[in-house]
Amino acid sequence: MKPLLRLSFVIALLCYVDAAFGQEITDVRWVSRDTTVGTVQVVGYWKKGEKKKFRAYKLDKVFKDDSLISEKKVLDAIMQFEVTDSTANSYDLVFAMLENKQMKTNKAISELPLEQLDIRDEDLALRYTTDANGMLKSYTNRVELEGKLDQIMKMVRQKQMDALKDKSEGERKLITAVGEKIASGKVLFSTMYETFVSQFHNLHGYATGINDTLNYRESVIHPATNKPISFDCYLYLSAIDTMGVAQFDIEKFADMKDFVKDYAAFLQTTREVSGLKRDKKFEQEATTVDMQMETYVTMVVDTESGWPTYMKLTRAISTKEPKNKETDYRYEVWELDSDLEDR
């Protein structure tokens, strides 16, 4: 597979995250149920004006078999959840960045002339509503926020295009079309906001026994192919201490048998629209790629207050071509940690 197209597959998966909305949950069933022990339930008991700060991380690692090829810290910031309203039926919250720890150290960020954009700090704060238990209900300003993020991503895409002036017009059109799909404000919202917020509230309203395991199917539409990726999911309580601090774990196993074919079709169609010929060799090679994706979520929650204290989501993607003996692995990690100190 050509390097550019291999990169396109990687980028395509980067723009997929576990979203709270646009997903479908089906076939929910208990695969393990123990009625002889007590029940643990996650409910938010929050007051207006409460604030919780977290250190937020987004890390990417790439391996070829056991060898580390690259490691990148995509996000390191102090984030805050603030309860702006509390009623008997719902909570209103704001999720905002207080400090970007990478602004001075990340060259790609620091070189962007963001001051040219009419964007204030408050424009980048996400406002949303939960139900009485604290389960995510709706986003208040998602459309407006995605619009601001899209302004930033347009600047990023333009900078990338400026570096590709030696490419043909067709190649530039192809890269632009793919970029508009996978490097948009909508995708940035999902990666930097929705993953954290949806997982943060994922367990509110959930009740389980200590030895119970819940199995369900989750289906999420991929933004490039416009087709669903289906997951076989398992949720269980791993531990709980005498203070009511509980650890929940979720394992998700994706069915990727059609994704490579569907994404290859998307690229081929986009090539033709851009004025390029179909790449028949790539089309044939794409059908032989073995791709696997697994997602693991760990959530630690104080059940006395309903506030999570730690969240980690790891997505592991492996790809292997029949001609190659080596397997490529990409690990993406999202973390929210109540410990704000530098690591």
Image (cartoon, rainbow, N blue to C red):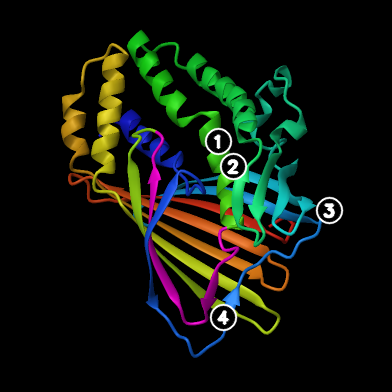
Query: Foreground: 325 or 221?
Result: 221
What is the secondary structure assignment of the residue under circle 1?
helix
Q: Which residues are magenta?
A: 202-223
Q: Residue beneath label 1, please?
A: 188
Within 10 Å of disc 2 (Cα), the crowding (few <14, some 14-19, many 20+) is some
Q: Residue beneath label 3, please?
A: 49
Decide: marks 3, 1 in contact (CB < 8 A)? no
Q: x, y percentage for residue 268?
A: 25, 24
Disc 2/disc 1 C-alpha distance (Å) = 6 Å
Q: Please identify, in this view, whether the residue under mark 1 or under mark 4 is nearer the observer.
A: 4
Q: Where residue 39 is drawn, which disc sits there?
A: 4
Disc 3/disc 1 C-alpha distance (Å) = 28 Å
Drawn side of residue 320 relative to residue 305, left or right: left
What is the secondary structure assignment of the residue under circle 2?
helix
Decide: marks 1, 4 in contact (CB < 8 A)? no
For the residue marked with disc 2, what is the amino acid? Met
Query: Foreground: 65 or 195?
Result: 195
Q: Please identify, in this view, whether the residue under mark 4 or under mark 2 is nearer the observer.
A: 4
Q: Quadrant of the C terminus?
A: bottom right
Query: Foreground: 99 or 149?
Result: 149
Disc 3/disc 4 C-alpha distance (Å) = 30 Å
Within 10 Å of disc 3 (Cα), the crowding (few <14, some 14-19, many 20+) is few
Decide: marks 2, 1 in contact (CB < 8 A)? yes
For the point 68% across and 38% down, which residue is it? 105
Q: Where residue 192 is drawn, which disc sits there?
A: 2
Disc 1/disc 4 C-alpha distance (Å) = 38 Å
Within 10 Å of disc 1 (Cα), the crowding (few <14, some 14-19, many 20+) is some
Q: Earlier in the sequence, mark 3 or mark 1?
A: 3
Q: Earlier in the sequence, mark 3 or mark 2?
A: 3
For the residue marked with disc 4, what is the amino acid? Thr
